[in-house]
């Protein structure tokens, strides 16, 4: 039987290029399944949902948009793959002025990590000049187009509009793949999900104390990718939004809410933030650079782990009460992880999340394709499950707490 799969794409700047490669391979696999009849039924799956935060939101949007039917044409895996790779090719620095700009920006972050003075100033003060509300930033940004820097490179909203020209022509009623985008509402502190099911009419727009569900929009995706140190908050219906890293990275809980028939059989996490600190490094981060790097990784993982742990708990309840009301009203959801190779991630740092060079992007994209291809060859029988597959080395554990403890 064809498995229903939802994929969740973590945010992490240019490290999300790994997800571009992995998603490309997954889309190619689905396309191949449709063309061939000799594939074992247990190796077949359909993509019923995709979610993302920050750069992961950009990946998720392009896959979803390529698959979505429009009033003037159907969607397809081929279109989704092509759009995904094309938008990332436009997102990286082009040869010439953009490459020089990327080098200067990336070097500034590297200098800050190394605590090296830049132009007579210490690096944190210098990088503060990148404040999007500051005079320095606005003056430089106004001149960059005159030097040949593309608007797609500078303006996230413009990039999204050009990448999704037929967004208003999406056929919501015939949409079969759900998209969830994670963002953070700044003033009220609301965990925010922009949900295509609200546009479709199968979910309601709502606000519930600390969380809210809103209709999907390109401005919502832009909000999900707004780091406040690099971009002004995205204003949507009178409220301001920052990166979803502060709330859900990425949204997964919403996939398992609702009628059993709509819940996916499996949830695949594309993980680009390592759960563990490199084994060959000191036991704890000590330098400012190490601390900042680890803080960012922890922010990118801990909220996700809480949601995934809840899914595992529900799985246990379904098994325990399988013959009672709860067990019949819910289903088990297998959670799996597809992650960057350990030798690669151990050498990545917070600063490299801002390296928009094509060589760096292509290296991670190629690795994503390689890892996903190997993983799909093992799936489902030989592919491990969460939480065992989230780490690079074994973590001592005494097992899960008793359900009576909750």
Image (tube, rainbow, N blue to C red):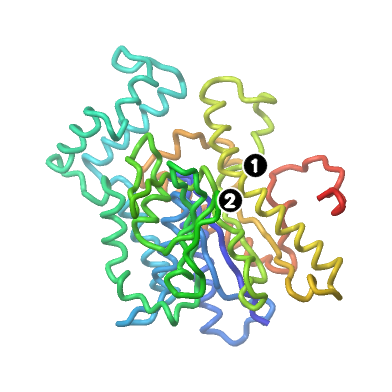
User: Could you say where residue 217 lies in the image, as x and y percent from the top left?
Assistant: 37, 62
Question: Horizontal placement of 39 versus 26: left or right?
Answer: right
Residue sitting at x 83%, y 42%: 397
Residue sitting at x 28%, y 40%: 99
User: Could you say where residue 286 lies in the image, as x and y percent from the top left?
Assistant: 60, 20
Q: Which residue is mark 2?
A: 271
Out of 37 and 140, give the one closest to the viewer.
Answer: 140
**Vertical placement of 42 versus 84: above or below?**
below
Helix, strand or loop at label 2? It is strand
Question: Horizontal placement of 63 versus 36: left or right?
Answer: left
Question: Horizontal placement of 373 versus 171: left or right?
Answer: right
Out of 107 and 166, give the one closest to the viewer.
Answer: 166
Out of 350 and 320, give the one closest to the viewer.
Answer: 320
Asked if disc 1 and disc 2 are in contact, CB closer than 8 Å, the reply is yes
Q: Which residue is mark 1?
A: 275
User: Could you say where residue 280 lies in the image, as x and y percent from the top left?
Assistant: 67, 29
Helix, strand or loop at label 1? It is loop
Quarter of the picture containing the N terminus is bottom right
The disc placed on residue 66 is none
**Vertical placement of 143 versus 86: above or below?**
above
Residue 105 falls in which quadrant of the image?
A: top left
Question: Horizontal placement of 164 versus 124: left or right?
Answer: left
Residue sitting at x 41%, y 77%: 172
Residue 254 falls in which quadrant of the image?
A: bottom right
Residue sitting at x 33%, y 14%: 121
What is the crowding at mark 1: few (fewer than 14 residues within 10 Å), some, or many (at least 20)?
some
In the displayed orientation, state which residue is furthest to the bottom.
37
Alpha-carbon span between mark 1 and mark 2? 9 Å
What is the crowding at mark 2: few (fewer than 14 residues within 10 Å), some, or many (at least 20)?
many
User: Could you say where residue 277 lies in the image, as x and y percent from the top left?
Assistant: 65, 34
């Amino acid at each position: 039987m064809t498995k229903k799969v939802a994929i969740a794409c973590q945010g992490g700047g240019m490290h999300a290029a790994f997800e571009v490669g992995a998603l490309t391979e997954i889309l190619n696999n689905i396309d191949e399944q449709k063309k061939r009849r000799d594939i074992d039924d247990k190796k077949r799956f359909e993509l019923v949902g995709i979610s993302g935060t920050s750069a992961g939101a950009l990946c998720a949007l392009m896959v979803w948009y390529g698959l979505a039917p429009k009033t003037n044409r159907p969607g397809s895996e081929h279109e989704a793959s092509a759009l995904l790779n094309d938008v990332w090719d436009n997102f990286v620095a082009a040869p010439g002025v953009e490459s020089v700009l990327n080098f200067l920006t990336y070097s500034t972050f590297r200098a800050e990590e190394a605590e090296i003075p830049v132009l007579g100033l210490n690096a944190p003060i210098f990088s503060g000049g990148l404040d999007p509300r500051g005079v320095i930033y606005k003056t430089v940004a106004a001149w960059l187009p005159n030097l040949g820097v593309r608007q797609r490179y500078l303006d996230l909203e413009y990039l999204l509009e050009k990448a999704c020209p037929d967004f208003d022509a999406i056929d919501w009623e015939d949409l079969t793949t759900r998209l969830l985008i994670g963002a953070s509402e700044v003033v009220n502190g609301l965990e925010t999900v922009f949900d295509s099911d609200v546009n479709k009419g199968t979910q309601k727009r709502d606000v519930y104390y600390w969380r809210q569900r809103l209709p999907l929009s390109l401005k919502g995706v832009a909000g999900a990718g707004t780091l406040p140190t690099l971009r002004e908050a995205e204003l949507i219906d009178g409220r301001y939004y920052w990166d979803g890293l502060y709330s859900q990275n990425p949204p997964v809980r919403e996939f398992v809410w609702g009628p059993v028939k709509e819940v996916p059989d499996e949830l695949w996490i594309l993980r680009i933030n390592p759960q563990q600190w490199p084994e060959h490094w000191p036991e704890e981060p000590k330098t400012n650079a190490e601390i900042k790097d680890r803080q960012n990784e922890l922010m990118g993982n801990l909220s996700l782990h809480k949601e995934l742990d809840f899914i595992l708990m529900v799985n246990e309840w379904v098994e325990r009460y399988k013959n009672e009301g709860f067990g019949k009203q819910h289903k088990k959801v297998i959670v799996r992880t597809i992650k960057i190779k350990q030798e690669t991630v151990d050498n990545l740092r917070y600063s490299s999340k801002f390296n928009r060079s094509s060589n760096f992007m292509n290296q991670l994209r190629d690795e994503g394709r390689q890892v996903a291809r190997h993983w799909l060859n093992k799936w489902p029988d030989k592919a491990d499950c969460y939480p065992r597959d989230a780490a690079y080395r074994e973590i001592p554990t005494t097992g899960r707490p008793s359900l009576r403890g909750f």
